[in-house]
Every structure is written in structure tokens, then in C-alpha cells.
Amino acid sequence: MNVVVDGDELAREHRRYLWGLCYRLTGSAADAEDLVQETLLRALERPPARADEPVRPWLTRVAVNLGIDRLRARRRRVYDGPWLPSPVETAEDAAQEIGIEPVETEGRYDLLESVSMAFLVALEALTPRQRAIVLLCDVFDWSVREAAEALGMTETAVKTMHHRARRALSDYESSRTRRTPELVEKTRVALGRFLAALGSGDGAALESMLHAEVRHLSDGGGEFFAARRPIVGRDRVGRLMVGLAKRVDAGARVSFRMVNGMPAAVLERPPMRKIAPRSILQCEIGEDGAIRAVYWVLATKKLTAVRAVEG
């Protein structure tokens, strides 16, 4: 006989956890919301068979497998330019603002790192199942056996896929920097200087802040002017950014926020053909303080989880 499920209680207890899991899996706030609703509906319509077992592992299995299907469907569609995660606004030091809640243990990657732009972008190199395994084993600290049960795989297959996923993340690992209060403050300062140089059109000052192998990724979703491929290298990124800045009205409003656990700038300007009226700009810096990556999200549908600039 199936368990009788109280939908309201189930949502109160597990919604935040499920949202955080699905956001990490898909990189999309909108998809995460849909998947949580679908998972909770599945629990009401086809609840777990045993009342003596915790419901969260069951919910996780459902959400992860639905999420894998959603991720596969998204990757089958042609996307115009680089795909970036949808930014999610966070409080200065409150992990729960991004669908995170305390867990008994954390794995190789802590909860805030696992929602950073750098980490979510790195996960795009993985297959959907590899991504799910990394999240279950390396973020939520599930055992190989638990992950295998959730994904309907053998333990041997999980171990093999996990090893391949770790290898695919080797570039991220080699340049990985731990999130500390000092790194947050250095990033905030670097972002301010970067925007000041951009606003003044000072290409030399801008390039002086960039790492030699800096990467620029911009996601306009086919709506707005944006680089349609990753741009790599100090000179190329510097020229691109100065060129793009000329398209942006000098009177654009800027608000500094915490987005995905790190400082970011929300930029807004009056509507103009093919120019994004609203965007999120974030810089990733290394231990030397140089900017190693620039993430610029312009696509309208990606910005639903970030407040408009006030005033």
C-alpha cells in the first residue's frame, strides 16, 4: 500500500533542498522551479511504496532523473552563442538564499562553490548523468551505492562515470580558488575597477587587470548583441569589451549585488534595438588578483531571479 502524502508538509520540508539540487543540475532557475513542482506532483500522484523509509532519497531520485531528462532536452536544442547559467541573487553571506539548506556533510565541493558561475560553467562539459553523479557524490556526499540506486545504475558504472567526470573537470580543478571573505572583497574591488575602465574606454587600464589567458563568455540568447563564441586572451577580450562598451549608454545604471555567492554588477539602460536593457556582469579572479573569466548574461529569460536596479 502506498504512503499517504501531505503535499503542503512535503513542500515545506523539501522544496528548498529540491530547488537547490535541480538548479545545480540544470543551471536554470526556471527549470529548477518546474522540476520541483513536477517532483512534488509525482509524490502526490504516485507516492513511494514504503512509509518506513525516509522520503527525501525518494524525492531526490525522482528530481534527479527528471532533471537529467530536462538537461538532455535542452542540449538537443541549438543555442545561439555560449550558454551560461541563469544568475540567482544571494545575500552577502546567506547560503540559504539560493535554495541551499544545511546538510549533515558536504563533499569535495561546498554548497556555495557548487552554485558559483565558474563551477556551473565547468559542469557543462559533463554528460547529464556525469553531472548528476558529481552533484550527488561530490557536493551532497552520497555514497557510490546511494548514487547507483538513485540513477538505476550499477556501482561499477557509477565509479567509471565518476572517474571520467573528474577527469573532464581537471581544468577547473587546476585553477580552482576557494571562496573566502578575502576573495569576495578582492573580486568586488576588481569588478569596480573593471567597470570604471570600461566606462572610460581605457583599454590599457582594462587589459592590465586581465590574466593572459582570460576567457569572456556572453549569453545574449540570440536576442541581443553578444559574442557568439568564447573569446580567449588578454588582447582579444580587452578589445571586445571596449568595443561593446561603446554600444552602451554612458548613463547606464549600475547596482552591485551578490550573485551565485560572488559580487556582480546589474546593468540597466534604456531600450535600444539589439542592445540588452538589462544584464549581469561578473568577473572571476585568481589568487594573483587578475581577472581570469568574464561572465556576461544578457538574455531576458535568464534574469528572472535578479531584482531590477532601483531608482
Image (tube, helix red, strand yellow):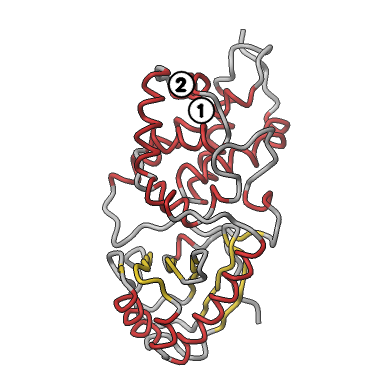
Residue occupying image coordinates x 49% and y 64%: 286
Residue occupying image coordinates x 55% and y 45%: 33
Residue beneath label 1, please? 62
Residue 21: name its quadrant. top right
The amino acid type of the residue labelled 1 equals: Val
Give the side of residue 222 with respect to residue 87, left or right: left
Residue occupying image coordinates x 45% and y 65%: 300
Residue beneath label 2, please? 148
User: Is 58 in front, or is 190?
Assistant: 190
Q: CA distance from mark 1 to mark 2?
A: 13 Å
| Circle 2 crowding by C-alpha within 10 Å: few under 14, some 14–19, many from 20 | some
Residue 210: name its quadrant. bottom left
Which numbered mark, 1 or 2, is in the foreground of this view?
2
Give the side of residue 147 with respect to residue 180, left or right: left
Is disc 1 placed on a helix, strand or loop? Answer: helix
Tell me if label 1 and label 2 are in contact, CB under 8 Å: no
